[in-house]
Structure formats: structure tokens, C-alpha cells
Amino acid sequence: MTDTRLRSGHQPLDDVLGSGLPANGISIIMGLPGTGKTIVAQQYAFTNASDDHPVVYFSTVSEPLEKIVRFGQSLSFFDASAVGKSVFYSDLGQTAGQDGLPGVAEHVAAVLRERQPGLIVIDSFRALRAFAADDADFRRFLHQLAGRLTASPVACLWVGEYDAQDIALLPEFAVADAILDLTTVRTDQRDMRYLKVRKLRGSGFLSGGHAYRLGPDGLQLFPRLADIGRQENYRLGDQRITSGIAALDDMLEGGVWPGASTMVAGPAGSGKTMLGLHFIFGGLAHGEAGVVATLQEHPTQLKRMVRSLGWPPDDPRVQIVYRSPVDIYIDEWVHELLGIVDSTGARRVLLDSLIDLRVAAPDETRFKEFLYSLTQRFSRQGINLFMTFELADLFDTKNLSDSAVSHLSDNVILLNYFKAEGSVNRAMSVIKSRASGHDPHMRQFTINEKGITIGDIVVPPGNAWM
């Protein structure tokens, strides 16, 4: 195998691994039952198989060989014509039962001489420990096997039912050049799958947990969005752009800067989504395509709102990305969003809403990290991000944001209700505008068939906010 990297056939996984696993090294794919270890191993097998450098897939005593092959046939990458030609399946468990671990080592050595494979898979490697008399016996076998494998130009995948504690205790992890850990994490009522690179000798890799799903195409990985703060400068336009509402532009002293992030916070029904739609459709007149990423409004509901305001609900320049927050991986979602923004050339993005996105995040730290990365990436690209954030208090806002959202936003617009003359009214105020002055006054606004109309300065009498 001439390439110094073993490819997975799935580019996002190779990217996380710094372009792949070591081509002439020993890699461990670890995880508890049901995490997809065998699927990943077979994905590597069929991706790297060739007539000159075939793949030998050894089963042991953890899972019958027939079951591995039968299940593999349900996957799209499984090539039946390659079996027996460039992919060879072999039962190592029978050898282990008859001749013990010395027989296993001899069997593998014989395959190396006969097949000259480019890749060997042993599934499950941990199951071989049952054939050792004691720990010392297994260490002798491990030393002998590893020596024979490393002396040959072959990549090895050892698959096993290990957990994180085993890494520090078991000798096979010291021998391994790379360790991939597949885990399932229970978050409230959902199980979420993550891949972590525990070790990759002589190479950089993307750290942290990367969400993945298992399906007919094998493992689909969604690399963790985590932008490290960059020191180099990047160029942004110096002409403000419209918010979609002329009166709001005046409050912002001419609009928002290119590449800025804007958060609009307010209680339920205060007009957050509508303000975001003004921002998206207001850009069309200036040739700026937009994306509406919604976790609340179904496209049918959203298009009805758009139609009622006189905007074209099916304008191809506006893409609607709807996902239910019930079963969403935020990394999967954001990679889809970034792909659509890139393919459409969108310059404006509405994210509705941050509350739903926070619920989908595995923890608060990951949510903050994710949001920072998203705002920084859009800023470097000169893309304007508009985010909605729902507040619990209808009248008296005691806390704008408990997720550090406001300090990541360049602009913060607050929507409120207030009572006056026996009615409940709406008010809007700009409470933050980075690198710019702004109108600090509260202004009453109404919602009608034309959308949002901003009026004069309002000072609620007495305790009208309470």
C-alpha cells in the first residue's frame, strides 16, 4: 500500500483523522455493543480492497462469520463480486479453539505470506483474550502478533468491545497507533452517537466528540463545529446593509454591518420570527439570497405567514431548512445548513430559534462552543446571521440570556409587551450595537398585513411594564 493513509470512504471521517488512519499501523475500533464497530470495519474493508492488495476480514468468537457477512450485504458499500476476489472472510475463532493463541499468530502469519493483504481486520480482537492462560500469556501473544504485523506493509484494524477505562489498563492500546472510540450517550429521552479519536500516533486530528448516524450507507459522521479564534485579519464590507425595516435601520444608525450577527429576544408572540423574515426578504431587493433555518415553524406554516405579508412564498432565492428539534444532532444540522448556504450563495441566514437549538445540544458548554463557531464562521464569510431567542417574561425582562448568546451577538434587539390605556402593546429597543451607536429609546410597533411598523418613542406610564 503506497498511500501513507488508510481511507474510510467517507470524507468527513478522513478529515477528522487528518486525512485517514495510518496505512501501515495498528488501529483499534472500540465501543460497546451496538455502536457500529463492525459497520465501520467493513466500510474500511470494501473501500481499501484491491486485487493487488486484498483485505482479509477475520471473525473470532464474538460474532459468527456468517452473521457478519449477511449483515454486511444490507449495506450499500458491500460488493458481492469482491468477496473471494479482493475481500476474503475467514473464521479465526476455530483456530483459536483448536490451537490457542499460538495457532492464531501462525494463522495470521500464513495469511500474510499467502495473500499479501493491504488490510487485515480482526473482529473481535478482545474475544481472543479468553484463550489466554493469564495476562502474561496474552502479552506474549500480543508481542508476537504485533511484531509480525508491523514487519509487513499491512494496515490492521482490531475491533473490540472496550470502554474508556480499558485504554489505561489493557496492553493492546499501548501497541495501537490509532484508537477510534464509538460511544452512545443518553441525553434526556434520546440516544446520541459520538466518535472520538483517543489516539493517532504521529498525526494531528480533530478533537472532541463528533456526532454520527448509522444507516444503509454505513457511518455518516458530522465533524464537531469548533472554530479556534484566528489571529489573521479578514476583510468585510464597510457599507451597512438594511434590516428590512427602514425605521429599524434608523435605530441602528443606518443598518447592520456586513458579517454581523443579530439576536432578537422577546416573549412568545412578540414578532421575533416576523422581524427575521423582514430581514431575509428585505435582502432580496439588494440581490442577497437568504436561508431560513427553522426549528419551530413547519414550512407550510411559514409560507402562509410569508404569503399573508405579500412576499413570494416560493421565491427560489430563499431556501427554508426545517428540522424537528425532537431528533436533531446539531452538528448534522449545521453541516446541512452550511452546505445550503454555500451552494445557494446566501448572504443572510435566519436561525429560528436558539431555544430549540439549545435543547438539541448535549450540554450547555457544547451549545456555547457551537454558537461561537457558527457566528465566527459566518462573520469571516461576510454572511449576516439573524437569531431569535424566546424570553419567558411577558412584561418585565429580568434576564436577557443565560447562555452567553447576547455577548456573542453584534446587535441585540429587545421586544417587549407593555400595558397602556387598557391594552397590551408591543415595544422594540436596540440595547446593543457593536462598533456603532444606536437609538436607545423604546419605540412602539404594530403588526399588520404589511408586517412590522415601528412608531414613535413610548414611555410606559407608572408600572406599565409590570
Image: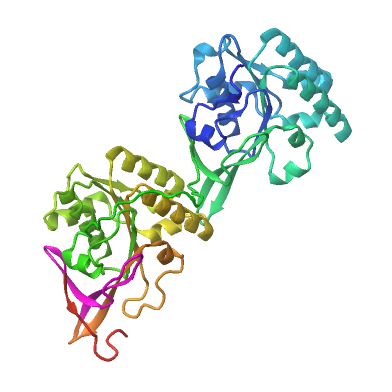
Q: Is residue 116 magenta?
A: no
Residue 23: give x, y in percent of width and height. 63, 24
Q: Is residue 375 above or below residue 46?
A: below
Residue 296: give x, y in percent of width and height. 32, 56
> Which residue is rendered at x = 33% and y = 40% of the image?
342
* Residue 297 visible within the image: yes
> Which residue is rendered at x = 43% and y = 65% of the image?
407
> Looking at the rendering, in which quadrant would you find the N terminus?
top right
Q: Is residue 227 above or below residue 7?
A: below
Residue 335: give x, y in percent of width and height. 41, 43
The magenta segment: 424-453
Question: In which image quadrant can residue 48 be found?
Answer: top right
> Which residue is rendered at x = 28% and y = 76% of the image?
440
Q: Main secondary structure of the magenta part?
A: strand
Task: Between residue 380 and residue 413, name the one nearer to us.
Answer: 380
* Residue 121 visible within the image: no
Q: How many marks?
A: 0
- Judged left or right of residue 314, residue 46 is right
